[in-house]
Image (cartoon, rainbow, N blue to C red):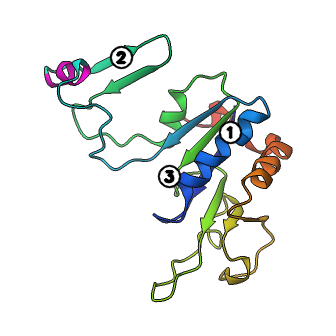
Amino acid sequence: MKVIGFAGYSGAGKTTLVEQLIPVLKLHGQRVSVVKHAHHKFDIDHPGKDTFRHREAGAFEVVVASDKRLALIREFEQPTQLGVHDLIAELDAGVDWVLVEGFKHSDLRKIEIWRAAAEGEVERPARYIDDPFIVGIATDDPAGLPQPTGLPIFDLDDVVGIGDWLLTHADRFVYKVEHHG
């Protein structure tokens, strides 16, 4: 499996880029999974559903499946901070690509999503300057980058170009399980 992260501030366009990149990779016959960092109070289950009732009754894990999908809901007895490598380990090993959204401090190779500040906004610092794991930048304003760089720079809307670059350089993104854990 190959793994690439997408890092940037909230509202920069990470989710949109990942969402648009999935079908681009699928057109090339790639199986794609996504790992997303969420805030601690997120929930995918809802009151009244059987799975919610099982969790409320105290189940540690609830697995629900149909002929179309499977979902695992795990309740932690104590607050637990899983790292990105823990989450990747939960995925099907036969997937071709894992797109990781968030986890900006991880040791995964990442594309930074950087937007120039709109009028009246405070400029947010770019990560590529200090983060050796940033391997490319997707931006709406290449000329506005705070520092020159030798990294590949992509137009934020050039999802096909980003996908082609990932596929061309796929060997750079092979995930080596033995190095993590």
Coordinates of residue 129 in the picture (x, y in percent): 65, 73
Mark carried by residue 63 = 2
Task: Write down the region rendered in magenta.
Answer: 51-56
Residue holding disc 1: 23
The 10 Å Cα crowd at callout 3, few under 14, some 14 to 19, many 20 or more, is: some
Name which of mark 2 and mark 1 comes first in the sequence.
Answer: 1
Q: Residue furthest bottom?
A: 120
**Residue drawn at (47%, 64%), measured in percent from left and top?**
11
Q: Element at badge 1?
A: helix
Nearer the observer, 94 or 179: 94
Between label 2 and label 3, give the one nearer the viewer. 2
Residue holding disc 3: 103
Indicate whether 98 appears above or below 31: below
Q: Residue furthest top?
A: 67
Nearer the observer, 172 or 124: 124
Q: Residue furthest left?
A: 57
Name which of mark 1 and mark 3 comes first in the sequence.
Answer: 1
Q: Amino acid at mark 3?
A: Phe
Coordinates of residue 66 in the picture (x, y in percent): 43, 12
Coordinates of residue 31 in the picture (x, y in percent): 68, 28
The 10 Å Cα crowd at callout 1, few under 14, some 14 to 19, many 20 or more, is: some
Q: Quadrant of residue 70?
A: top left
Q: Element at badge 3?
A: loop
Nearer the observer, 90 or 158: 158
**Residue drawn at (65%, 40%), measured in percent from left and top?**
22
